[in-house]
């Protein structure tokens, strides 16, 4: 922990103790619904409204929860025009939200430098994703659209005691609006540049004395922002439709909600062959020179390419077949709660999810069919949680058990229509190909079982001093079957069926087909902490938490030995923080400083077996490294004047490998100790405001803007390479709206207002062309909503 962090925390605590009578918060009743939350401020009372969260699996004021947590309400989501969780990128300190270069539906969440950068499900997660209390095992599909959302809670730091394995970085907890006993609804309509169209609607209906229902439908589509110079099409388009229904029964102390949701996604991916920024130098492989139609130095050298190839804003790319990402996502759940029983407040959450995904990627970026991949993934999960919350007079307990079973099947087909030596005549379209075509098929089939039991308690030591203790035992078992088959086509062209276009079978080169891998792991994690109420609205807290990410098997194998298994990784996090409302409740300051010891990190690594002519190179995931992570997060909200809210946040993150020997294909070992982790910018800040004021009776205006800065960061590559390094970014979003009769709202919005150009994701494996995904340019539009 840095000296500056300790001084800052001590200074705030002294300030708080010196002014105990000036600290007050006028808490507002969030309503009879225990899930309700009011994330706004109360300007007329010049104090913050109470924000209720369920971060500890019970309803609490966010300022009373002794962890670093951010709550994003529905108004903030609308202000940011965040149609997916990725729209919150930059809004939360030390939280990175991204995706992969060619899989736009798959999430890459990194919190405090801890994340997983692998699109295939075998790699697991380090940031838990929870939707309506239902944990989502797969990050595939986690970036589908947000609509009719009550709030999003982001919990930073290990959350293993209550949320289980694979939450070493933290948890993203999404809560959708639930049915209430009042008639109501809303209609939303929006239009923006790139022909973006959004149409949505919600209906809430009481169906009797104890029964109510809520239905939501939303469709969001737009054209792509990358131009394909071959056929004139747009790349990176998106089209997502969401259907959600909930049925809620409330009678006395029993509350049950049955829900179902279907998401249909038909997206493209705006990828190009990996470059840095527009007009930067880029390696051009031999034989590609004439394809780009740009002046280049001799083959094998570096070439300064024009914006029309690399820029996602000013031109297009040479790409023969548009990328495709089609997904269907189904989710169902039953949430039941029975309160005031002899065993406490009983909760049962039953959940099921199923998805299928098809993706096509043109990986060469040229106008010929050269290197293409086709991927398909199907998966399902079932989970059941039972828990009870009870109070023993100054001691609050949460005790429960959790079971989950998951299964997925995945294939990836790779075809290379020639292995080298090609020429392409732009005028005649004549293609001369060289070596035989290559086809490779990878298959993965995995089952996972998880069983855990947990307990967490808070107990009062004095009137203001409280201790917490939690423990969780977890048993994980994984079974994996993976194989890779490779074949050649003597015609120089191969299909995805493993044959030449005329049906001639390819010549098999070999198959990596290991026996079924089966392994199990046991883990005990815990949490110990103290929090002290310095004044009525100021709390100091500290804790030590241990979490783990389960072991597993490598699914994308080249030889049988690649399968593994690899062992779990562990983290120990020590955090100290202060939360407080000051000056009569008009200023809210939350600060946290932390240190994390990260061990047995699961990282991709090549290796060699045999010697001489029998030397074979493998590539697998092993427990290759350890790291130390330390940092500070500070968030400030100020009710400056009536209706004017100022927000600011700052984060410092020092995330470095402590012990990591990385093996290069040449056999050379590189010591990466001291190098930064991926998706871990050293500095990040954001600042913004919202201003609400009356234009005349029954007409209110709302203005808002947000600025976010992120320093340089390494994206996907373990090695620090120029094309996988994202330069510092400065992003500004803005919005304005007018509301009539507390029912009709007309607004305008803009994201990336100053058209910042930057790379959002990169695939940069050694020896490959690599893929780049440029972030969307400036987007803007108008929107209308009606509520009743």
Image: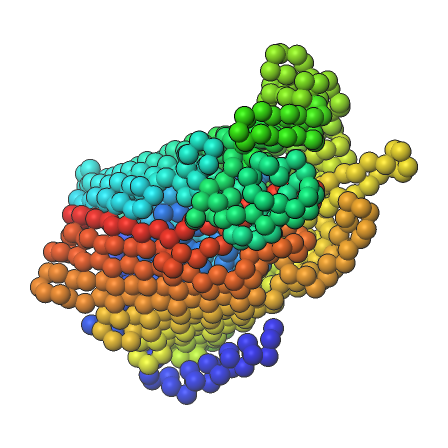
Left or right of 10, for residue 191: left
Residue at (64% x, 50% y) in the render: 717
Q: Position of residue 391 (x, y in %)?
A: 43, 60
Left or right of 39, for residue 283: right
Q: Please state which of residues 717 and 456 is positioned toward the viewer in this rendering.
A: 717
Residue at (40% x, 40% y) in the render: 224
Q: Please state which of residues 42 and 684 is positioned toward the viewer in this rendering.
A: 684
Residue at (56% x, 62% y) in the render: 712
Picture mark count = 0
Q: Position of residue 474 (x, y in %)?
A: 61, 47
The image quadrant that residue 72 belongs to is bottom left
The image quadrant that residue 227 belongs to is top left
The relative height of residue 605 versus residue 632 in the rendered view (above or below) is above
User: Which residue is farthest bottom?
Assistant: 18
Q: Is residue 127 visible?
A: no
Q: Is residue 9 visible?
A: yes
Q: Quadrant of the N terminus?
A: bottom right
């Amino acid at each position: 922990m840095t000296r500056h962090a300790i001084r800052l925390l001590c200074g705030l605590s002294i300030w708080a103790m010196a002014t105990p009578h000036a600290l007050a918060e006028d808490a507002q009743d969030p309503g009879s619904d225990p899930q309700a939350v009011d994330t706004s401020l109360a300007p007329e009372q010049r104090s913050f409204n109470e924000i209720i969260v369920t971060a500890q699996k019970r309803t609490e004021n966010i300022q009373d929860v002794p962890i670093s947590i951010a709550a994003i309400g529905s108004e903030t989501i609308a202000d940011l025009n965040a149609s997916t969780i990725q729209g919150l990128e930059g809004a939360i300190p030390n939280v990175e939200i991204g995706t992969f270069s060619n899989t736009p539906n798959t999430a890459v969440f990194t919190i405090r430098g801890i994340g997983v950068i692998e699109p295939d499900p075998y790699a697991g997660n380090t940031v838990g994703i929870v939707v309506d209390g239902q944990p989502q095992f797969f990050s595939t599909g986690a970036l589908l659209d947000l609509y009719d959302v009550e709030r999003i809670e982001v919990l930073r730091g290990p959350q293993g005691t209550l949320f289980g394995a694979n939450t070493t970085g933290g948890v993203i907890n999404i809560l959708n609006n639930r049915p209430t006993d009042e008639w109501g609804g809303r209609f939303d309509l929006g239009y923006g540049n790139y022909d973006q169209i959004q149409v949505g609607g919600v209906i809430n209906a009481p169906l009797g004395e104890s029964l109510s229902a809520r239905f939501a439908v939303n469709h969001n589509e737009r054209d792509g922002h990358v131009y394909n110079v071959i056929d004139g099409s747009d790349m990176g388009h998106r089209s997502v439709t969401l259907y959600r229904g909930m049925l809620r029964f409330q009678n006395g102390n029993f509350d049950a909600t049955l829900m179902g949701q279907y998401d249909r996604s038909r997206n493209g991916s705006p990828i190009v062959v990996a470059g840095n920024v527009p007009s930067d130098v880029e390696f051009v492989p031999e034989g590609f020179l004439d394809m780009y139609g740009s002046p280049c130095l001799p083959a094998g050298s570096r070439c300064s390419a024009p914006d029309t190839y690399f820029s996602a804003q000013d031109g297009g790319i040479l790409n023969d077949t548009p990328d495709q990402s089609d997904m269907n996502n189904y989710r169902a759940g039953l949430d039941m709660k029975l309160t005031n029983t002899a065993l406490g407040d009983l909760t049962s959450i039953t959940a099921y999810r199923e998805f299928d995904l098809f993706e096509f990627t043109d990986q060469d970026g040229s106008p010929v069919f050269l290197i293409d991949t086709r991927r398909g993934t199907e998966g399902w999960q079932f989970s059941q949680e039972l828990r009870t919350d009870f109070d023993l007079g100054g001691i609050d307990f949460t005790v429960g058990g959790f079971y989950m079973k998951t299964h997925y099947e995945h294939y990836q087909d790779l075809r290379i229509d020639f292995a080298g030596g090609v020429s392409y005549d732009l005028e005649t379209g004549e293609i001369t190909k060289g070596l035989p075509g290559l086809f490779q098929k990878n298959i993965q089939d995995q089952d996972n079982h998880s069983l855990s039991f947990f307990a967490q308690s808070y107990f009062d030591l004095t009137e203001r001093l409280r201790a917490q203790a939690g423990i969780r035992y977890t048993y994980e078992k994984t079974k994996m079957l993976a194989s890779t088959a490779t074949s050649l086509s003597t015609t120089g062209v191969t299909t995805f069926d493993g044959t030449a276009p005329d049906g001639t079978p390819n010549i098999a080169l070999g198959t990596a087909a290991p026996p079924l891998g089966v392994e199990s792991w046991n883990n005990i994690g815990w949490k110990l902490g103290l929090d002290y109420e310095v004044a009525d609205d100021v709390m100091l807290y500290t804790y030590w938490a241990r979490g783990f990410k389960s072991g597993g098997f490598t699914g994308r194998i080249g030889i049988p030995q690649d399968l593994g298994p690899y062992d779990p990784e562990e983290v120990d996090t020590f955090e100290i923080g202060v939360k407080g409302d000051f000056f009569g409740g008009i200023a809210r300051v939350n600060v946290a400083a932390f240190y994390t010891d990260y061990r047995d990190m699961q990282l991709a690594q090549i290796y060699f077996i045999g010697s001489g002519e029998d030397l074979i190179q493998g590539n697998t995931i092993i427990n290759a490294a350890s790291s130390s992570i330390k940092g500070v997060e500070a968030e400030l909200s100020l009710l400056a004047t009536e209706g004017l809210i100022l927000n600011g946040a700052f984060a410092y993150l020092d995330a470095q490998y402590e012990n990591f020997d990385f093996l290069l294909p040449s056999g050379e070992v590189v010591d990466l100790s001291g190098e930064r982790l991926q998706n871990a910018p050293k500095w990040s800040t954001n600042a913004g405001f919202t201003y609400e004021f009356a234009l005349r009776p029954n007409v209110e205006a709302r203005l808002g803007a947000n600025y976010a800065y992120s320093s340089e960061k390494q994206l996907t590559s373990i090695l620090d390479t120029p094309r996988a390094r994202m330069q510092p970014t400065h992003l500004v979003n803005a919005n304005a709206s007018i509301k009539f009769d507390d029912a009709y709202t007309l607004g305008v919005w803009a994201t990336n207002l100053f058209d910042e150009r930057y790379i959002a994701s990169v695939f940069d494996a050694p020896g490959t062309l690599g893929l780049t995904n440029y972030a969307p340019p400036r987007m803007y539009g108008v929107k209308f909503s009606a509520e009743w």
